[in-house]
Each structure stands twice: as structure tokens, then as C-alpha cells.
Image: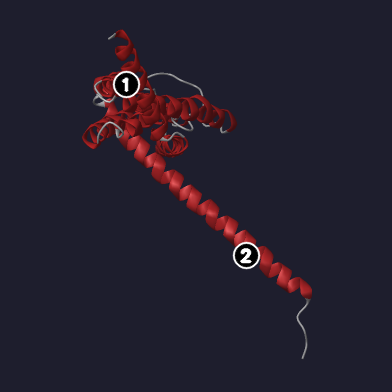
Amino acid sequence: MRKAPAFVGAGNKESQIYGSAFLRAKIKHVMAGIETAIVLFLYHLGLSIEGLVRFLGSYLPTILVIVFIIGAWRIKDRAYRWYVWMVALLVEIVSRGILAQVLQLIIPRQRPFMTLGVRSIIENVTSSSFPSGHAVFIFGIVCASFLINKKFGWAMTIGGVLVVLARVAGGIHWTSDILAGTALAVGTFFLVIKMLPKKRFEKREEVLEEEKVDVLQKEN
């Protein structure tokens, strides 16, 4: 029986690789088209409510931070209050201060208003849009809010969603920027709470209470 030449198999392999690359490129093109359509839809919607978009995208983040600070400050257990402070602080430092900055440097990406040739409703920023720094920052706070209580966390989540939707509607971010920023914040949050056990703060509180009792006994 006659054997097929060796180069036939190699040709089939090359065609498979080419076909796979073509399929990936096609999927990427379709996804980019869908994302552009979503961004344009939200942008044109935002044009009709520019004032609200500016408020939600620029000022609501500050309000959410203040609300979180008040919520955390109202925690009666001093040790747990410090635990919430430390988790929120570490999440913001790692996710927003380090990881997001590095990603923006190594993954340059034009903002929607620049790519689509429209005006920015919120602000004219030219730095890389990926990932969304606002999404990273806000959802880091949102995750920490769930440590206070679930109702407070879900209320903060609604606020966070309004912020990131406004950033997209304002022409500042692509939806993938928002998703990446949110994933980065959530992932960092779970990493921090795993590396920062609450028990450490509980033990510290016990030591402080014992020291306080000793001082009172000496005074008496």
C-alpha cells in the first residue's frame, strides 16, 4: 500500500493552526463590535442626561467613600473596625495603587471618546483606559463594605454600578475596562482577607482589654 508523503500531514497541521487563528480573530472582531455597540448606546443615552452622568461619574465615588467611612466607624467592636479599615486599605493599595497602574503601563488602550471620535462627557483623560481605575477603586470599597453587613454591601454595590455605568456613558471607558477593574478588585479582596486573618485583630483586642483591666486595678 502506498504511503502518503510526510508533507501532507504538515500541511493539514498548518491549515488547522490557520483555521484556529482565523476563528479567534473572528470571535475577537465580533466581541469588539458588540462592545462598541454597547458603549455607543450608553454614550448616546448619556448625552440626554449629561448632568447626571457627570455627577455619577465624578462625584458619587467621593460620596460612596464617605458613606463607607461612616459605616465602618459605626462598628462597635473596635478590633473588627480596625480589621475592616486594614482590609479596605490593603485592597486599595494593592489593586488600585500597584496592579492597576502596572497594567495601564503595559497595556496601552485608547479611551472610547478618542477611538470613536466623540467628545467626553465627563473629563478629557488620555491615559490608558485598561483597566478602569474607578472600577478598581470603587469595587475595592464595595467588597470591604460587605464586611460591615450584607445590606450595606449591596447598597454600596448599587452605587458602584451607577458609577461605572456613568464612566462608560461618559465615553471614558469600555465595558471590558470595567469588567477587568471589577475582577481585579474582587480578586485582590479575597487574597487580602485570606492573608489577613481576623483572628490577629481579635487577639490584639484581648491584649488591649487585659492591659486596660490591669491599669484600672493598679489605680484602685
Q: Is residue 57 above or below residue 165?
A: above
Judge whether 55 appears above or below 32 on screen.
above
Amino acid type, mark 2: Gln
Please identify the quarter of the rendering in which residue 209 is found: top left
Quarter occupied by residue 65 = top left
Which residue does the numbered mark 1 point to in the structure image? 65
Q: Secondary structure at mark 1?
A: helix
Residue at the bottom extreme of this rendering: 1
Q: Residues within 10 Å of mark 2 (few under 14, many from 20)?
A: few
- The alpha-carbon separation of the residues under discs 1 and 2 comes to 52 Å
Relative image position of residue 197 (x, y in whole percent): 42, 35
x 63%, y 61%: residue: 17
Q: Nearer the viewer, residue 73 or 143?
A: 73
Marks 1, 2: nearer the viewer: 1
The x and y percentages for residue 36 are 40, 39
> Is residue 121 rendered to the left or right of residue 117?
left
Q: Residue furthest top?
A: 219
